[in-house]
Every structure is written in structure tokens, then in C-alpha cells.
Image: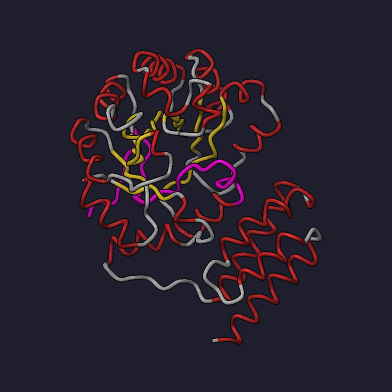
Amino acid sequence: MNSIINIGPVRLDMNVFLAPMTGVSDMAFRSLVKRMGAGLVISEMIASQAMIRQTRASLRMIQAHGEEPMVVQLAGCEPSVMAEAAKLNEDLGAKVIDINMGCPVKKIVNGHAGSALMRDEALAAKIIEATVKAVNIPVTLKMRTGWDDNNRNAPKLAKIAEDLGIQMITVHGRTRCQLYNGRSDWNFIRSVKEAVKVPVIGNGDVVTVEDAKNLLAQSGADGVMIGRGAYGRPWFIKQAYDYLTTGAIPNDPSLGEQLEIILEHFEDILQLYGVEGGVKIARKHLGWYSKGLKDSAEYRVHVNQTECQVQMRELVRNFYNQQTELI
């Protein structure tokens, strides 16, 4: 398997990526996943208007630490605004700009951005063209298979995008109307791969290392992007890559190693958001980490009730120490 991906002049030696996920793939999680081994990590989706206003939230979203090349994903529906936001991010150090045409969330779609743009190929083309022309760094595109089952136009839009200078295309194998229901159609991604020459990355429903292999086999894609499958498993991206390259199923980190990872992640969250905000944001991650462990439901109740960082650390340590004793 060739695991090298070239996004224009940007060379990646690993072809398994972390997906951009609002409220999840912040700097704390991205940098952790990158340290544990990922070909690429991508910022949370940032509204181009907010980026231009340089709101505190948008600037925090593009903070980076040890995650080169820095990739910033932008969403919007106005070509000039997207272009300005892309240029601003280039000036701030981004090495790749990713255009979001895949987000299915109602708030984004109602603003004629995200996957809504798949219904308006002319506007999508204007946004792509303006963004590509605005920067001297590669621009990539993330999209779905189409708006609904009757309008799966991803291959056509992919070809338009390639002709306008897009350097890599990621396809989530669902339509917008599916949201996250049903199954990701990895076979359909093959039609996108066959329509273009730039690298195509497949996304959707990769929760085991075998899923990563099957996605590549069914889609013919050049790489895999993992989203929800990485919840509570920042090591899973590297596991999937190792399985693809060696055929051996990697072991999860030991519970002791997981505890160290979790506490490191917790400290990074506090550093990024401050103590009060950080404790609240950490709760969902701590819940995901504990999935499948004994008495984890009770543990999550305590996690969601704890507001003190000192008590939170103690709670986490005690829970994992008890898990170790149960083995």
C-alpha cells in the first residue's frame, strides 16, 4: 500500500487522518492525536465571517501546537469572504486550507454553507475559485456524496473542484439528508476517485482497524479520514495506519498508559480554555475514554457533577486504578 499523500507541495507520509469535528478536534485533541501518530489533523470548522472578525473563539480554533502542517477548515457561502478568511489564515501560518461542503448541521445548511453548497454547483465553484486564487498554499475540499439519494453529485463537483485547483478531496459516504444515519457508502466514493486525479480520502463509519482496510478496498481511495471512531481513542488513528501497513491488529494502550494520556489531555484542555471552562469541556472526553470499562456509567455521573479540577484528577486516577486492580 502506498501511504504517501501529496497535497500539492505538502507531503504526508501517513494516509490516515483525523477529521475536523466541531467541539472535538480543538488544539488539545489535535496535538494529542498528532503526537500519537496521524498523517494529518484538521482544525474545527470555522465560519469565514467569524474568522474575518477574528473573534476570540475563531482564533482559539486555529491555535496550533506541534501539528504541522497546520490545516484550517473554513465554512461559508460568500466567495469574497471565504477568500479573505483563507488569506488571513495563510498569513497566520496555515499550510493548507480546507473548504467545508459537507457539514449537515441545520444551522450551517440554513446559512447556505456546508453541504447546502452541493445543491448549488455554480456557487460552490465560485467559492472554490476565489479561495484557491486568494492563497499560495494548497486548498482542499471536504464534501458528502450529495444532498440526497436523488442528487448524489459528488463526482461532478469533485471534477469541477479539481479543474479549479483543489489539491485533495475528502468524501463522507453519506448524503446530507442522511445526517449520520444509515451506513456510509464506501463503494460510491470510488466514483469520485475515478472522476479525478488528485488524492481522494474516504470518510465515514471507520470504528475498527478492519473498517479502514475495507473502506480503502471498496472505495479505491488514497487514504482514510476518521472522525467519531477517534472519540476517546486518540491512539486509534495510528492503530489503523499500523494495521494497513503491517496487517497486525495493534493492542490498545494499557490502562496505566491510558491514564497518563487522559491526564495529559486534561491538562491541555485546562491550558486552552481555563479551569472553569476546561473542566466542563473535559467531561465529554472523559466519558468517551471510559466507554466499555466496568462501572463506567457511574463514573460518568460523577464526572458530569464535578466542577473542581483537583477533584476531577482524583476521580480519574481512582477510576483507572480500580480498573487495573480488576484485571
Q: Residue at x 46, y 34 (%)?
A: 104
| Relative horizontal placement of residue 32, taking residue 138 as reference (left or right) | right
Q: Position of residue 198 (x, y in %)?
A: 26, 33
Residue at 71% x, 32% y: name it.
56
Name the residue at the left extreme.
194
Magenta stretch secondary structure, dominant: loop
**Residue 167: x and y, percent?**
33, 30
Query: In the image, which residues are magenta?
Result: 1-28
Left or right: where 211 falls relative to 19: left
Query: Which quadrant holds the N terminus?
Result: bottom left
Q: List x then y, in percent, for residue 213.
A: 27, 57
Reply above or below: 207 against 127: below
**Left or right relative to 22: residue 167:** left
Q: Is residue 207 covered in magenta?
A: no
User: 62 or 228, which lies in front?
Assistant: 228
Specify the color scheme. Answer: secondary structure
- For the image, the number of numbered tags is 0
Q: Residue 75's x, y, as percent?
A: 50, 27
Quadrant location of the C terminus in the rendered image: bottom right
